[in-house]
Image (cartoon, rainbow, N blue to C red):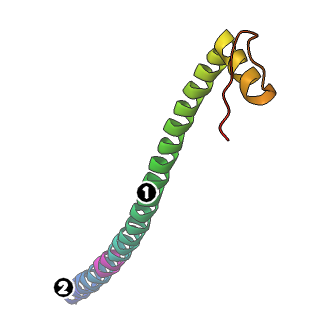
């Protein structure tokens, strides 16, 4: 009887091991599916963020170019030529020895 009892315990352990391995396999498969789904959603988010980064980098370049233009204008605005231009355009001033011709 001792031999039959040992055989029965081994058989139960074997069934428990198979059931345990099956459950572990199912859990691992579920985790793999979850990781795959999350991976795809993260790739989509990354693509959207990359697009947004490209747009923002273009805006930065445009603003840097605009800043350079403003610096150049600020330098020009301090010159005598700029003052003369403004006086002619907005105030209609001329030098005393200038002759102005107007179209009819």
Q: Secondary structure at mark 2?
A: helix
Q: Residues within 10 Å of mark 1 (few under 14, many from 20)?
A: few
Q: As displayed, is residue 85 above or below residue 26?
A: above
The stretch in magenta equals: 21-26
Where, by quadrant of the figure, is residue 23 drawn?
bottom left
Magenta stretch containing residue 24, yes or no? Answer: yes
Q: Residue at x 41, y 59 (%)?
A: 47
State whether residue 79 appears in this view. no
Q: As displayed, is residue 57 above or below residue 85?
A: below
Query: Disc 1 designates what residue?
Result: 46
The dot on residue 67 is none
Judge by depth and name the residue closer to the eye, 62 or 53.
62
Dominant secondary structure, magenta? helix
Q: Secondary structure at mark 1?
A: helix
Image position of 66 (left or right of 34): right
Quadrant holding the N terminus: bottom left
Considering every residue shown, the one lying at the far front of the view is 104
Magenta stretch containing residue 89, yes or no? Answer: no
State whether residue 5 appears in this view. yes
Q: Residue at x 52, y 46 (%)?
A: 56
> Distance of mark 2 from mark 1, alpha carbons?
63 Å
The dot on residue 3 is 2
Q: Residues within 10 Å of mark 2 (few under 14, many from 20)?
A: few
- Residue 16 spot, x, y in % from top left: 31, 82
Image position of 31 (left or right of 84): left
């Amino acid at each position: 009887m001792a031999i039959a009892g040992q055989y029965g315990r081994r058989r139960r352990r074997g069934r428990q091991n198979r059931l345990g391995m099956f459950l572990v396999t199912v859990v691992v498969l579920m985790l793999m599916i979850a990781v795959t789904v999350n991976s795809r959603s993260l790739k989509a988010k990354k693509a959207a963020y990359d697009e947004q980064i490209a747009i923002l980098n273009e805006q930065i370049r445009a603003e840097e170019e605009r800043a350079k233009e403003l610096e150049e204008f600020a330098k020009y605005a301090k010159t005598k030529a700029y003052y003369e231009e403004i006086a002619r355009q907005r105030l209609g001033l001329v030098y005393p020895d200038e002759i102005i011709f107007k179209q009819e």
